[in-house]
Image: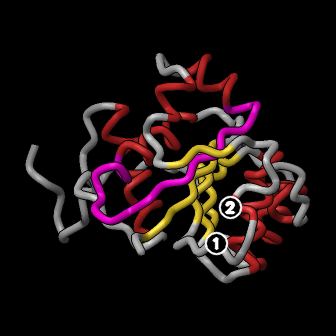
Amino acid sequence: MSRRIVVGISGASGAIYGIRALEMLRNVDDLETHLVISAGARTTIAMETERTIAEVNELADEVHKESNLAASISSGSFRTDGMLIAPCSIKTLSAVANSFADNLVARAADVTLKERRPLVLLFRETPLHLGQIRLMMQAAEAGATLMPPVPAFYHRPRTIDDIVDQTVGRALDQLGIEVPEVRRWSGRPPKP
């Protein structure tokens, strides 16, 4: 059996993170991707990118409707190697933290946690109020890895794509997937 990764794209700004994750995962041998795009994400993708939903769907091996709570990824008996929600909206974080599985993104995340599989949330919100910080703590206590897409600069990014690639690559590290786009720290900055 090949490895399986679930990618959820929620409605927060930063849809490019989920799209880029799917692009990177396409180049990983022996890996099957399952995609769920929320209703909010459909709007964000149209507003922030030049991609159509059909083009984003084509990046995944299997696409699931957000409303399909009977999808394969809604059950713990369907083996996966983890899930990435990129970006993760405050609404989705709240659903994950409170086990409120009213759509497939939240249900798949809940299943990921209950099965003790890695769940990485690229939580996209700033500034934060205390209620959001408490939700982050609840999600972390349940087993999620919260990874706000904070840019790194040690790799000397020259473009927004460089920043996105580094962030997405590091998120995939949390799922045990190494991609060549990540520039790793070696003790001194790379030469320009």
x and y percent of residue 160 in the render?
Answer: 37, 32
Q: Is residue 31 above or below residue 54?
A: below
Left or right: 99, with 182 as reference point: right
Q: Which mark is residue 94?
A: none
Q: Are marks 1 and 2 in contact (CB under 8 Å)?
A: yes
Can I make out residue 93 in this image?
yes
Category of crowding for the residue at label 1, using alpha-carbon neighbours closer than 10 angstroms: few (below 14), some (14–19), many (at least 20): few
x and y percent of residue 184 in the render?
Answer: 25, 64
Quadrant for the C terminus in the image: top left
Which residue is situated farthest in the bottom direction here? 116
Spatial CA distance of label 1 from label 2 is: 6 Å
Which stretch appears magenta? 24-41
Mark before the other along the chain sequence, 1 or 2: 2
The quarter of the picture where residue 89 lies is top right
Assess whether residue 27 is covered by the magenta stretch. yes
**Where is mark 1, residue-wise?**
78
| Residue type of the residue flagged with mark 2 | Ser
| Residue type of the residue flagged with mark 1 | Phe
Q: Residue at x 79, y 60 (%)?
A: 107
**Where is mark 2, residue-wise?**
72
Q: Residue at x 85, y 56 (%)?
A: 95
Assess whether residue 25 is covered by the magenta stretch. yes
Q: Residue at x 32, y 65 (%)?
A: 30
Category of crowding for the residue at label 2, using alpha-carbon neighbours closer than 10 angstroms: few (below 14), some (14–19), many (at least 20): some
Q: Is residue 17 above or below residue 189?
A: above
